[in-house]
Amino acid sequence: MGRLDSLFASCRAERRAALVGYLPAGYPTVADSAALLGEMVAGGCDLVEIGVPYSDPVMDGPTIQSAADTALRAGFRLRDVFSLVESVATAGGRAVVMTYWNPVHRYGVDAFARDLAAAGGLGVITPDLIPDEAEPWLSASDAHDLDRIFLVSPSSTEQRIAMTTKASRGFVYATAVMGVTGARDQVGSDAPGLVRRTRQHTDLPVGVGLGVRSGAQAAEIAGFADAVIVGSAFVARAGGDQERARSEVRSLAEELAAGVRGQVS
Amino acid sequence: MAGAHQGAGDGRTVGDVSGDDGAARTTDAAPPASTLPSGHDPDERGRFGPYGGRFVPEALVAALDELHAEYEKARVDPAFVDELRRLLRDYTGRPSPLTDAPRFGEHAGGARVLLKREDLNHTGSHKINNVLGQALLTRRMGKTRVIAETGAGQHGVATATACALFGLDCTVYMGEVDTRRQALNVARMRLLGAEVIPVRTGSATLKDAINEAMRDWVTNVADTHYLLGTVAGPHPFPVMVRDFHRVIGLEARAQVLDRVGRLPDAVAACVGGGSNAIGAFHAFLDDPGVRLVGLEPGGEGLETGRHGATLTAGSPGALHGAMSYLLQDEDGQTQETHSISAGLDYPGVGPEHSWLKDTGRAEYRPVTDAEAMDAFQLLCRTEGIIPAIESAHALAGALTLGRELGEDAVVLVNLSGRGDKDVDTAARWFGLLPGEDA
């Protein structure tokens, strides 16, 4: 059983997709990101992905790269991610962590899982860890009851989708386009096909991310996926004057939350 | 698959590309006729002990599988091996000579220093060995576009060269800092028709150029081959790039035996990502009497923190697709490095080197900027050879090794590249520019 099963069950009961919002921990500062995550939850994100800023983010486009850079320069430490997870959980939200693998490896895979679970985190999304290399994480996530969200891509073979979904728990992250993160005007044309292929191999919910930025796009994806994942569009609103940032992040969450319910103005 | 490539019809595989034809062009003996499999291949996941593997986005796995499958076929395909061999002979100019350096050797405790002249290859460094192999593979896979990273520009120039030769589209990512200190190579790549994209993120050096190349690859993987220039990165790059460079050591081993009548006491090579070193070391792995010594960029000294001595001062971690030694902080963030040599200014290293370090088969030592530049000048003035600053680290290591081993010792140095690109840096270092005091 996955920690996110109840979330997806209730979304299904409401006949809608879940809204998943991403923000890098510590951007622009640790305190600011705590407040922004609060706005995302209050605005209607069913789940927040708290990103770990990393020095070499090869899956990220300029928006998230530059946010990670800002966070690291502002003194972000890996342990800050646990306090942010805790703040979300305490406020009644749900949080998973999205992280490149080396910070977890360095911290100690089991120790990271232990501390994340203790903070109330529900799982980890691993953009550069494939199940083939994940033995220590498979056992640590079992030991500490965390979901493990692996990625599938338009280039994945049937065999790899089967293997990857089997190793996953909670949901499966389908990258809608070949490419790095960043808001795009159009959802990748590969996305519906990838979701369909993924569903042939698993009953797990399938979330779609990479490039979503508007309520209309959220509604479009909600038509064929179980979760709509939005990252760069939140990040682009999170910098600068924080009063304005909180308000813009809140209203984007509200727009997207309406989108996943099929209510597009 | 490991151990599965004994099947070459005539026993020739990519490791022995010089083959018989080389004998006609050199007074030294030709390399042994059949030398692969090396007996030192990684497991089927690309692991050398705990190092290597594939720490990459799922989006790249299909391309890596395709590359691996194509390489496994090509490495035992006589047509592929013959074509590569012909290119290395007629285009690169292999086998590269072995040069005695007696006046230099006087400063190395009187040891006999032998230089493996990869600097005399077409494009001026060892990099062309790997590039020609991967360019042939690109064509076999039907891909039309090549991307590459470059530090000093040597790999970028070699890649631009091969793309011109094969009619492939070429984009090279280069840290902005490096485009300034290696401006000559930027111009060379552009002359050859490549697009050079300066990378401004992070430390704007080699590490960031690789990040940007990986982002490009994730986006354009369908028609694009990432022609990685070193023995790092995800499987199969470390084993494939190594195989393409094994020719260095295979030739050198035969040349030293022919010239000296015995094996060298030590082989010295510089290590950034580690491609020239692995190429030089590999033929000697099963010769226990031969010490294999990798020289890392000590920068301004290990104690200053401004260096790139990954194996000396790093710890295991995952960067750019492989588990290997890495210069990282307490949180696993990659640390910024420093070296006067752009080609060695890299916080990671190929996974096989990490394994050779842990098993004790090879040893790795730091060489500071100042030591490297002293050796650079010494080779210029004693032998009339201007080395690349990268290779000058190996020369500095040879000076120390010679003094340790004594005058009866034979030290083989891989002179991985020539120094034309470094004349500006060297002139500044030594104060040789007009208006400066020497």
Image (cartoon, coloured by chain):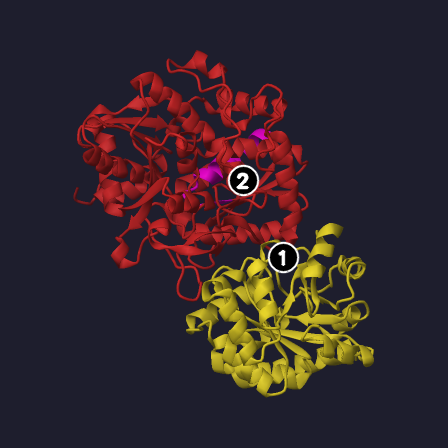
Q: Splitting the image into 4 quarters, where does residue A22 fall? A: bottom right
Asked if the residues shown at circle 1 and circle 2 are in contact, with their CB atoms under 8 angstroms apart, the answer is no
Chain letter for mark 2 = B
Q: Mark 2 points at which residue?
A: B194
Residue at image point 38% right, 33% down:
B416
Residue A153 in sight in this render: no
Q: Is residue B408 left or right of residue B141?
A: left
Q: Closer to us: mark 1 or mark 2?
A: 1
The quadrant the C terminus of chain B occupies is top left
Where residue A61 appears, as percent x and y from the top left, is 58, 61
Amino acid found under the numbered disc labelled 1:
Pro
Q: The red chain is which one?
A: B
Where residue A48 appears, as percent x and y from the top left, is 63, 76
| In this view, B251 is above or below A17 | above
Chain letter for mark 1 = A
Amino acid found under the numbered disc labelled 2:
Ala
Residue at image point 49% right, 15% down:
B20
Residue at image point 56% right, 42% down:
B236
Name the dominant secondary structure of the magenta segment.
Answer: helix
Q: Give the range drawn in magenta.
A: B149-167
Farthest residue, direction bottom: A91
Q: Splitting the image into 4 quarters, where does residue A88 fall? A: bottom right
Query: Which numbered disc covers residue B353?
Result: none
At mark 2, the secondary structure is: loop
Q: Is residue B163 magenta?
A: yes
Label 1 vs label 2: CA separation? Answer: 37 Å
| In this view, B135 is above or below A251 | above
Q: Mark 1 points at which residue?
A: A131
**Visual hue assigned to chain A:** yellow
Where residue B75 appears, as percent x and y from the top left, is 59, 30
Question: Circle 1: is it few (<14), some (14-19), or many (20+) Cα within 10 Å?
Answer: many
